[in-house]
Image (spheres, helix red, strand yellow):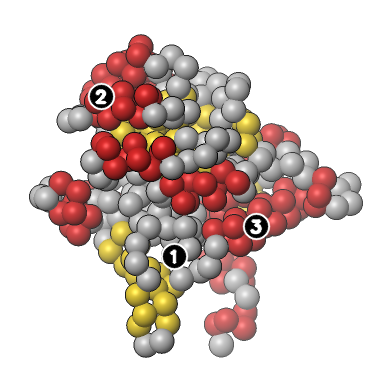
Amino acid sequence: MKMRKTVTYDDVLLVPQYSDIRSRKEVNIGSFLDKKRFYNLPIISSPMDTVTESSMATAMSLNGGFGVVHRYNTIQQQVDEILKLQDGIVKAAAVGISGDFAERADALAEAGVDILCLDVAHGHHIMMKEALHLLRRDYPHIHLMAGNVATLQGFEDLASWGADSVRCNIGGGSICSTRVQTGHGIPGLQTIMDCATSIYAGDTKIIADGGIRNSGDIVKALAAGADFVMLGSLLSGTNETPGEVKTINGNQFKEYRGMASKAAQHSWRNKTSSIEGVVSTVPCKGSARSVLEELAVGIRSGLSYTGARTIYELQDKCEFVMQTNASQIESSPHILRN
C-alpha cells in the first residue's frame, strides 16, 4: 500500500513578490484552450442542469469565457439550446460516453458546436478511451474536452487518447459526495499540481474543476498549472441559470444540484444508481456578469501580487507555502469570527 501527503486550496498560500505592475489593467488573464482558441477570461461554466443552458453560455461568452451546455435532456432539447446561441457565441456542449452519446455528438456537430465535452464522473475508463477514439476520428476539427480525472496517469491517458483538454479533480465540488460515498479522490489542488508535471501539459490543457470557492482559489489553481477553471457553485443562483426562482421568508432562491444526486438522476433517466451528489438551494445573486467581473478583478489582483502580467508568468514566478491551522484562521477576516 502506498501513501503520500497531499494539499488542497486551504493548505497553501502564494508568496507575495516584487511587482513593477503599476495598474491591474496591465494584467492579461486570458488563456489558450488550444492553438486556435483564446479566451479573455479563464473561466468555464459547468455542464449542470442548474447552471448552463443557452442563457448562461451566452453570458459566459460575452464576458470572455464560455459555458458548456449540459446533456441532461433529450438530444433535440440540447440541440435547441445550441441553436439559440447567436453568431460569435462559443458553442460548447456535453455528451456522455455510453448510450446515445455518438448520436448526440452527431446532432451537436450538425448544429455547429465548437467544443464537445465528454462528461463523466470517472473519466479514466475504457469507455472514455473508446469514445475519444471515435469522436477524434469523426470530428478532427472539434475541440474535445474530457474528464474527470484525479491522477497524472489519468490525465496522460486521456491526452494520448485524443483529448484536447482535460477536466481535473474528482469529488471536490460543493454538492458532490463522491469522496464520501466511494472513499476515492485526491485533493483538488494536488491533482492540478500532479497533472501540470505531465509531458502533455501545455499542449493538452488542464481545467481545474471542483472545490473552487473564490477568486483566491482560482489564482491558486492557475498558479499550480491550470489553464482554466470550471465553476458551478459560484455561478449558481444567477439570473442566467435554469430553474424557477423560489421565495422563502421573503428571500429569493434557486435550486442547485449535483448531477449524481437522487433528484437529478430521477429527472433525466428515471432511475438512480450510485448517489454521489446532493440538492441545495442558493440565494439569487443577480447577473452572471456581476459575478464574473468580481472574479476577474480578484484574479488580476492575484497575478499582480506575484508581479505577473499573464497566467504563464504567474506559473513561472509563483511560490507556494504551507499553512498551519492557525494561519488558515488568520487568513480570514477576523471580525467575521466574532
Residue 260 place in picture, x, y as percent: 24, 51
Whichever of callouts 1 and 3 sits on the residue coming sooner in the sequence is 1
Q: Which residue is mark 3?
A: 293
Q: Secondary structure at mark 1?
A: loop
State how far apart marks 1 and 3 are (Cα): 16 Å
Is residue 227 positioned above or below 18 on the image?
above
At horizontal 38% and vertical 25% (from top left) the residue drawn is 109
Q: Which residue is mark 2?
A: 102
Whichever of callouts 1 and 2 sits on the residue coming sooner in the sequence is 2
Q: Which residue is mark 1?
A: 237
Is residue 158 positioned above or below 305 on the image?
above
Residue 49 place in picture, x, y as percent: 33, 52
Badge 2 density bin: few <14, some 14–19, many ≥20, Cα 10 Å:
some
Residue 152 place in picture, x, y as percent: 42, 30
- Amino acid type of the residue tagged 1 in the rendering: Gly
Whichever of callouts 2 and 3 sits on the residue coming sooner in the sequence is 2
Say whether residue 156 is visible. no
Q: Secondary structure at mark 2?
A: helix
Front in this rendered view, residue 325 or 195: 195
